Structure formats: C-alpha cells, structure tokens
Image (spheres, grey):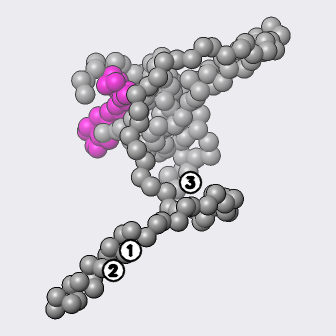
Amino acid sequence: MSKYIIIFLGLLIVAGCTPQPIPGPDGAQGPPGPEGTAGEAGEAGEKGIQGPPGPMGEPGKSLSEEIVNTLKEKLNQLDQATLNKEEICALIPFKEGIAPQILGFAALTTNGKILIMKNTSPVNIGEKFIFETQIADRADFVSLSVLSGEEGEKTFYVAITADGHHYYSGDLKEWNPQGQSPF
C-alpha cells in the first residue's frame, strides 16, 4: 500500500510543479444569448432631489370671447334642462261621485303637478291626461297615494316629497300642506 501512496504523492508533485500556460488575448464578443425570464421587481429607492424646470412651451391659442360666451350659454341651457326635467313619479286610480261614478287615473309629476285622465264611461278608458292643479312649487315629489272611501267614508289623497313634506286632498284639486315627517 505504501507503494501506491508514493506513486500518488509523486503525481501530485509533478502536477503541482508543472508550469501553467499563459492565457492568450480575449477574442471578439459573440452574439447575445437568449433573454431569460424577468425577475421580481425590487423595492423603490429614495426619491432624489427635483431637477431644474424645463424650457417654456409655446403659448396656447385663445378662444374668441364669442365662442366662450356661446359655450357658457349652452352649458347653462343644459343645466336648466337637467334641473327642470319633470317626470311622472306616481299614477293612481280614482273615483268621484256616487251615481254615476266618474272613474279615471291621476298622475303626479316630480314638480307637483296633478294630471287627470277621466274615463269616458264606466267601461271605456279616457284618452289623455289633462293638467288639473299644482300641489306646491317644489321639484322633489316622489309619491301619490289614495285611501279610497267606501259608502259613507271620505276619500283622501296624499302626496309626499323626497324630504318628507306631505300634502293631502279630498278631491285632487285643493291641496293642503300637512307637515314634514323626519326620515
């Protein structure tokens, strides 16, 4: 076994004492390899100081006063059309009188207008709604309801606004404010 150790040590000495070759000059760079997958984004560093302002841009073009006024007028008209948009918010049936009874429908608009369509007979519906009255000068009405009275009872109509103001009537013509309910 000592023979093998001596041979092994001899090889190590010969390999260690052999002069290393001198590397030659670097060659030309080859083409880039394929792009790898993107790694995770790192944390953002601290914000640096702000640089100097850039050069001034060219001055903008101004609109004529006539165009500006026309645009303002059109925007005001659009605002008014949006604010004054009146819609039907409730529709109820109604009965008037005893014999012969008048039947029909009453519609309430968001501006508080009552529109009436009376049936032409007990078996034929009316043809169109006609303005009857305005409950109040408000634009936030949301509902109209009827408590129809039977024989010997009185019929009541109630209209209410979005903020709780309510009005009552016995005939859909004369309306009385009743108060405001907190909601």
Q: What crowding class fits label 3: few (fewer than 14 Cα within 10 Å), some (14-19), or many (20 or more)?
A: few
Position of the N terminus by quadrant: bottom left
Residue placed furthest toward the left: 1
Query: Mark 3 and mark 2: span between their CA atoms?
Result: 124 Å
- Can residue 100 be spotted in the picture? no
Q: Residue at x 50, y 52 (%)?
A: 122
Query: Does residue 46 appear in this view?
Result: yes
Q: Which of 151/167 is in front?
A: 167
Q: Secondary structure at mark 1?
A: helix
Marks 1 & 2, CB-CB < 8 Å contact? yes
Identify residue type, mark 3. Asn
Looking at the image, residue 34 lies above or below residue 93: below
Question: For this rendering, which residue is in front, 162 or 74?
Answer: 74
Tell me where residue 143 sits by quadrant: top left
Q: Which residues are magenta?
A: 148-170
Q: Amino acid at mark 2?
A: Leu
Q: Could you tell me if the residues under marks 3 and 1 are in contact, i.e. CB atoms within 8 Å?
A: no
Q: CA distance from mark 3 to mark 1?
A: 121 Å
The quadrant the C terminus occupies is: top left
Between discs 3 and 1, the one toward the N terminus: 1
The x, y position of residue 33, in whole percent, is: 61, 64
Q: Residue at image x 48%, y 33%?
A: 108
Looking at the rendered structure, the number of numbered marks drawn on it comes to 3
Taking the view exactly as shown, the residue that stands out farthest to the top is 65
Counting from the top left corner in percent of width and height, residue 163 is at 34, 24
Q: Residues within 10 Å of mark 1 (few under 14, many from 20)?
A: few
Q: Which residue is mark 1?
A: 15
